[in-house]
Image: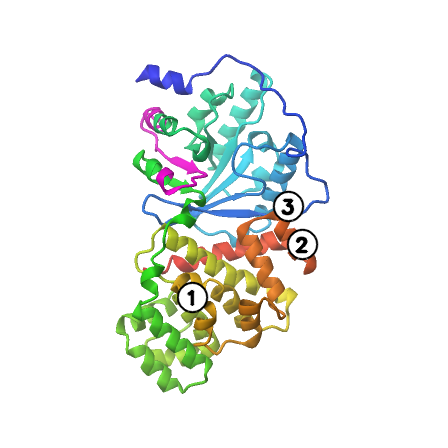
Amino acid sequence: MFAHLKKLFARPPRVMPPRQATTPATAAAKPGDAIFLRRDAVFDRRGQLAGHLFHTRGALPATLDDAARRQADSALLAALNASKAAWNANLAFISLSSASLDLAAVDELRSANLALLLDLAPIADAAQEAALIARIEALHRRGIAIALLRQPKHPSFGEIIHLADYGAVPVAATEPSLIRDFSIAFRASRQGRPVDLFAVDIRTTDEYRLCHLWHFDYFHGSFAAQTSPAADEAAVDPHKMQLLHALHLLQSDAETAEIAAALRQDPPLAFRILRYLNSPLLGLDHRVESLTQALTLLGRQRLTRWLAVLLFAVREPAVGDWLLIESALTRGRLMELLGQTLLPGQPADTLFLTGIFSRLEALLRRPLAELLAEIPLAEDARAALLHGNGPCAPLLALVEAAESFDPARIAPHAEALAISADAVNSALLAATAWASEVSEHWG
């Protein structure tokens, strides 16, 4: 076993890693380039949303030159530090180059539920390695955890991996046998310390199953979009059909008694609605004890909003469900937050419903036009969702682009709306935190 550990973790002969030449693929970003924040879902072993991975130019060992990566890291840290009010209790992994740990903004980060996902930058000598180790130890004293990407060819990897709280593997770029070996070696090297393994950039369900088999604790990557959510069942779920009927009644100005009666026809749904409305999220002064009282206290618009949110509630969500849930809730909240300044005359509920209903077709597996025909939605929302026009359409396009994280796609939409990358990043963080908080109250 010790020979195996030495092979995987021991220091190789010190060779200064060559500096990459600047090419079009690795050229530094221009000073005026907008840097947009990306947040990816991170799942635990139960397939539930555990937190997020935040980055700008990529979560894996950088192809950017040193200056460009430092600029991107600075922008990432600035966005996170400027949005402390938006953080919640979920775990946050922040992708950084080890060369960026000397940035003052690192010391401004909150310490709870935070891990820095490091890729190791070239180190010239033992003095630089000693300085890096001292910096990691200082961050530990502040309560910040370190997740280290597997980079066995780096001359300092064998030394620094023993300081890491999380062992991380770039799965798509790593042979399956090496993923297994790393898991065995990292767990054996803990010597009583907590074991946390983080699988980064999982692209297929087979890779996900392999990492789950080899005791990884956290999972990230595009594999989640390939897992079939329980939406096949949602298309015939009577609870969701009843919710659509209630939304139709609310939007059609039906009598309060008729709406309450419709909801009471499904006792489990009525129970879930009341439990949800009494959650700390709403902060109501009075406990809501009946559906009629809910209508009176909340009003139709607010109740419409929460019924729309409940459409995406799943009894036992799997990885694919969580991805859809987070997407819908984040889009709705992001539309609302950005629309406060970009579309001040537009009702907040119209903006929110535009964002959340943009995922309705994926949820219910029915054509969106057919679904919206059953709900008297505001015309501006309908135009944006079905035809891509009207006042809400440019903002919806920006929200969808921000979710996909294609900077070349985001920038033109942001420029068209005259909104800065900083404003988009701040709103995205707040919307992400809100979506996570909302989903915590399901069950």
Kindly identify which residue carries mark 1: 309
Q: Secondary structure at mark 2?
A: helix
Which residue is at 67% across, 34% downward? 24
Please name the residue that numbered disc 2 is placed on.
412
Kindly report which numbered mark, 2 or 1, lies closer to the viewer in this rendering. 2
Quadrant for residue 15, please give it: top right
Marks 2/1: CA distance? Answer: 30 Å
The location of residue 136, given as percent across then percent down, is 51, 29
Tell me which segment is drawn in magenta. 183-207
| Mark with earlier residue (2, 1) | 1
Residue type indicated by callout 1: Val
Q: Residues within 10 Å of mark 1 (few under 14, many from 20)?
A: many
Task: Using the numbered discs, state the Cα–Cα distance from disc 3 to disc 2 in whole angstroms.
Answer: 13 Å
Q: Amino acid at mark 2?
A: Pro
Crowding around mark 3 (Cα neighbors within 10 Å: few <14, some 14 to 19, many 20+) is many
On the image, numbered disc 3 is attached to which residue?
A: 35
| Relative image position of residue 87 (x, y in whole percent) | 50, 51
Looking at the image, tell me whether mark 3 or mark 2 is earlier in sequence order. Answer: 3
Describe the element under mark 3 as helix, strand or loop.
loop
Q: Position of residue 97 (x, y in %)?
A: 56, 32
Q: Are marks 2 and 1 in contact (CB under 8 Å)?
A: no
